[in-house]
Amino acid sequence: MPDAAPALDADADQELVAQAAAGGVAAFEALYRRHASRVHGVIARLVGYHGARAEDLTQEAFVRAWQALPNFRFESAFGTWLHRLAVNTALMELRGRRGRPFEDSDEDVFDTIGSADSAGHVTALSMDLERAVASLPPRARAVLVLYDVEGWKHEEIAAELGMAVGSSKAQLHRARSLLRARLGEQA
């Protein structure tokens, strides 16, 4: 019976999508409430946990979803489609910043990584991991998030980020090595 809940969610989404595609604002608001935290989570991981930037991109992803909804063909689950749209929104923003300096790529970011305390050891370690991921160079962070968190294949990452498959693998290795080093410093 554990598979019944996702099926019910997909059915409810399908009904809401049909209503929203016909201009139903309340239905779209319901879709937003159902999916906003997951969309924000993937965007935040991709842009390095910069709160305002992640919030802006989350809103942009939902605006794009609203605009594209009339063309949604129900070939995949709405959540899957929306998640991919959110990832693409974040990646387009990262690509647009390629020619400009990245605010989150400075090595000084490591100074902001906190240490675990006795009262919130698990929470502190989780925050350290988030900060360490956020401090990675943008392309390495994007590959790490897409591969290790989102489950993409190197071929998909390479196509989306405009790099060779080997470069995707190298960036993943680089990201993991940097994380090990940075988190090892905190232990």
Image (cartoon, helix red, strand yellow):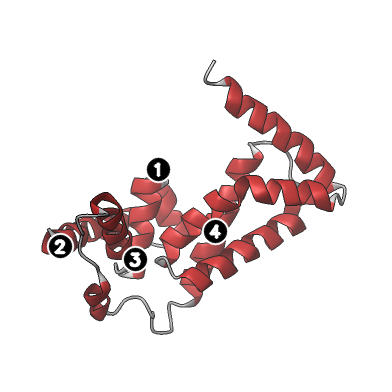
Q: Amino acid at mark 4?
A: Asn
Q: Name the residue beneath numbered marker 3.
A: 134
Secondary structure category for the residue under label 3: helix
Q: Which residue occupies 64% across, 64% down?
A: 59
Secondary structure category for the residue under label 2: helix
Q: Amino acid at mark 1?
A: Gly
On screen, residue 177 above or below 16: below
Q: Residue furthest top?
A: 1
Secondary structure category for the residue under label 1: loop
Nearest to N terminus: mark 1 or mark 4 = 4
Q: Amino acid at mark 2?
A: Gln
Left/right placement of residue 45 relative to residue 184 reads: right
Badge 4 crowding class, 10 Å Cα cut-off, few under 14, some 14 to 19, many 20 or more, is: some
Badge 2 crowding class, 10 Å Cα cut-off, few under 14, some 14 to 19, many 20 or more, is: few
Q: Amino acid at mark 3?
A: Ala
Q: Nearer the viewer, residue 169 or 105?
A: 105
Q: Nearer the viewer, mark 3 or mark 2?
A: 2
Q: Name the residue beneath numbered marker 4.
A: 88
